[in-house]
Image (spheres, grey):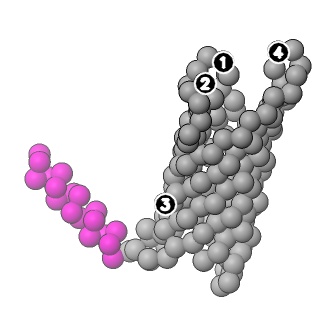
Amino acid sequence: MRRTIILLLLATFCMLSNAQTFKTSTTLGVDFGSTYNYKIITPHIAYTYNITPKLSVGVRAEDAVTFQRDDNGNKIGDDRFALGGQVGYKAIQLCKFVNIQPRISVGHTINSSGNQDYLYYQAGVYLTCEDKVGYPEIGFGFRNNFYHHSLDKNKTVFFISYAFILP
């Protein structure tokens, strides 16, 4: 059994090492999310590496600004810095330059107090118009902020994203 697992891992490594593109890119963007009483704006930067021509992984840093209303109707806002990772796959190529990519991101707030930190999960579909110099990207999806305390309830929002990718 152990030999079989080692052989499978080695075979997978050999197949992926030949398929690697060694292509990296930097993404500068912002996500806008909203529900009835909760809004989130997340300017972000991501650095991605293409494992294969279709599969990419990366790291993501964001500054999440949230606005919500408490039980008394008062407006509350906070600003949290978060680090995370993302995985994307170019599923469909519509034409020579246009790609559709589903992407999943996961991250956690950094240096926030214990009653305001959260873990986020984000899943979306992104449309990129690739060019040789740089290209825009638009996307939409869902984001869930999972708070680690009982003061805030978990928040799920629909988001729209706009970014610019530098190869």
Q: Dividing the picture into quarters, in which one does residue 33 lie?
A: top right
Q: Is residue 147 visible?
A: no
Q: Identify which residue is drawn at 67% across, 70% down.
A: 165
Question: Is 136 situated left or right of 75 in this image?
Answer: left
Type of amino acid at the residue the image marks with label 3: Val
- Marks 1 and 3, Cα distance to the nearest angstrom? 34 Å
Question: Is 32 situated left or right of 133 in this image?
Answer: right
Of circles 2 and 1, the one toward us is 2
- Marks 2 and 3, Cα distance to the nearest angstrom? 31 Å
Of circles 2 and 4, the one toward us is 2
Mark 3 neighbour class, 10 Å CA radius: few under 14, some 14 to 19, many 20 or more: many
Q: Identify which residue is drawn at 52% across, 73% down.
A: 24
Sooner in the amino-acid sequence: mark 2 or mark 4: 4
Q: Position of residue 158 (x, y in %)?
A: 75, 40
Sooner in the amino-acid sequence: mark 2 or mark 3: 3
Q: Residue 115: which numbered mark, if any? A: 2
Q: Position of residue 9 (x, y in %)?
A: 23, 58
- Looking at the image, is 24 positioned above or below residue 113? below
Type of amino acid at the residue the image marks with label 2: Asn
- 116 or 152, which lies in front? 116
Q: Identify which residue is drawn at 87% across, 14% down.
A: 72
The residue that mark 3 highlights is 57
Q: Position of residue 92 (x, y in %)?
A: 61, 65
Mark 4 neighbour class, 10 Å CA radius: few under 14, some 14 to 19, many 20 or more: few
Type of amino acid at the residue the image marks with label 4: Asp
Magenta segment range? 1-18
The residue that mark 4 highlights is 71
The residue that mark 1 highlights is 151
